[in-house]
Structures are given as C-alpha cells and as structure tokens.
Image: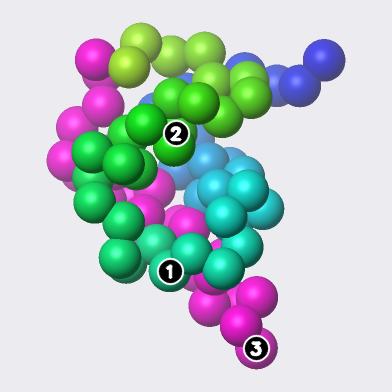
Amino acid sequence: MAREIHWTDAEEIGIELAKKFPSLDPLTVRFTDLHRYVTELAGFADDPKLSSEPRLEAIQMAWYEEYKDAQQ
C-alpha cells in the first residue's frame, strides 16, 4: 500500500506531480488547479481545506525542481 500524502509532503507531492504531468511547466499552473491536482493524487489523505498559499507555493517549487531536472 502506498504511503499517505499530506500537504506538508511538498517534495513527495512535487515528485508525484512531475510523474503525472511530465510536460507541464508547474509555473504555468494556477493554484486552483494545483490544489485539485494534489487532492486527486493517489495516496492523498489530508483535508483539502488545510491547504494554504505557502503550502501550494512549496509544492509548486518542489514540482518545478523535478520539472527542471527532467528537462536536462
């Protein structure tokens, strides 16, 4: 069984989003869409209402790092 994912797992979420959307530049994603993408991930087990702008920013930056690495 996969490990549960929570809002505080920014790096893990970034990795999972990079796998799910390999050609999507995370910096072009609106926070409303990012929120949905995170809550739809397999293993996401947190309260969707507990997201915040700083948490979404951390996730977006973690995803962006994975995206940049994949472009090289």
Where is residue 62 shown, x and y percent of the image?
A: 45, 57
* 47 displayed left or right of 20: left
Q: Farthest residue toward the left? A: 53
Task: Specify the quadrant of the image occupied by residue 18.
Answer: bottom right
Q: Which amino acid does label 2 sit on?
A: Val
* 48 displayed left or right of 62: left
The residue at 50%/26% (across/down) is 40
Report whether residue 15 is seen.
no
Is residue 65 located in the magenta-colored stretch of the structure? yes
Q: Nearer the viewer, residue 36 or 68?
A: 36
Seen in the picture, residue 24 relative to 47 is either above or below; the reply is below
Which residue carries the number 1 mark? 25
Q: Farthest residue toward the bottom? A: 72
| Secondary element type, mark 1 | loop
| Secondary element type, mark 3 | loop
The residue at 26%/27% (across/down) is 51
Label 3, label 1: how many angstroms apart (C-alpha)?
A: 14 Å
Which residue carries the number 3 mark? 72
Marks 1/2 in contact by CB < 8 Å: the verdict is no
N-term mark: 3 or 1:
1
Which residue carries the number 2 mark? 38
* Range shown magenta: 49-72
Seen in the picture, residue 21 relative to 2 is either above or below; the reply is below
The quadrant in which the C terminus is found is bottom right
Where is residue 22 shown, x and y percent of the image?
A: 61, 63
N-term mark: 3 or 2:
2
Q: Residues within 10 Å of mark 1 (few under 14, many from 20)?
A: some
The quadrant in which the N terminus is found is top right
Its colouring scheme is rainbow
Q: Which amino acid does label 1 sit on?
A: Asp
Q: Which amino acid does label 3 sit on?
A: Gln
